[in-house]
Image: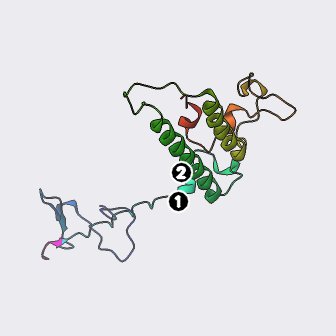
Amino acid sequence: MYDSIRPGRVAIDPVVTDIRALLYEPAGPIKYKLSYDDDYVLLPKRPKPRSTLLKPKLYQSRIPISQIKLTHLQELKHVKSAIKLKILVKAEEEEHVDDPEDGHAVARDPDQEEHDQDDVDTVARACGPHPTQPHSPSASSSPDRRSSSRTSVPAVAVYHTPYFILDYHP
């Protein structure tokens, strides 16, 4: 009647020829008989499918693999340098927030803000443009900044740095 209770088994597996020779137990295992005179035999379970291995970090990148121009190690170095810069700027900002004498907030020096912005611009230039986004002249940095013969760095250039570097406003 049935060639096999579970399709996909190999030819040497036992063949159940009559559905009345099957015994289903509530716990889940299935037993079978090859003839009515035999004892019930436990039907072997299928092997569990192998769990998928985790993909390497490179394949979890936000940039499509076909468009990656930097190695994964280079990308990590850029991210590390940007995070280090953020920590240094944040530590300096916290250092100068309150006046030690009366505890009131102190206005930041404009020259210091200019210096901080130069540090962020340096990281942006070091990182270069995002490989999937072309340079956009409309997305350039603020117009009141130095606009000499050198090209301005577009906002999309900081693709390896975390977004909080771009949103830094002391």
Query: Is 19 located above or below residue 129 in the figure?
Result: below
Q: Decide which of 165, 129 is in the foreground and name it.
A: 165
Residue 103, position in %: x, y?
37, 28
Rendered residue at 33%/67% (across/down): 47
- Total marks shown come to 2
Q: Quadrant of residue 89?
A: top right
Q: Amino acid at mark 2?
A: Gln
Is the residue under label 2 in contact with that under label 1 (CB below 8 Å)?
yes
> Which mark identifies residue 77?
none
Query: Is 168 located above or below residue 52 in the figure?
Result: above
Q: Amino acid at mark 1?
A: Pro
Rendered residue at 37%/68% (across/down): 9
Residue 168, position in %: x, y?
55, 32
Residue 20, position in %: x, y?
17, 61
Q: Decide which of 3, 5 is in the foreground and name it.
A: 5
* 104 relative to 96 in the view: left or right: left
Residue 66, position in %: x, y?
69, 50
Q: Quadrant of residue 139?
A: top right
* Residue holding disc 2: 60
Per the rendered image, the range of residues in magenta is: 37-41
Query: Is 37 located above or below residue 6 in the figure?
Result: below
Instruction: Kindly state the secondary structure of the residue where label 2 is placed.
Output: helix
Q: Is residue 82 magenta?
A: no
The chief SS type of the magenta part is loop
Instruction: Kindly state the secondary structure of the residue where label 1 is placed.
Output: loop
* Residue holding disc 1: 56
Calculate the distance from the C-alpha at mark 1 to the C-alpha at mark 2: 7 Å
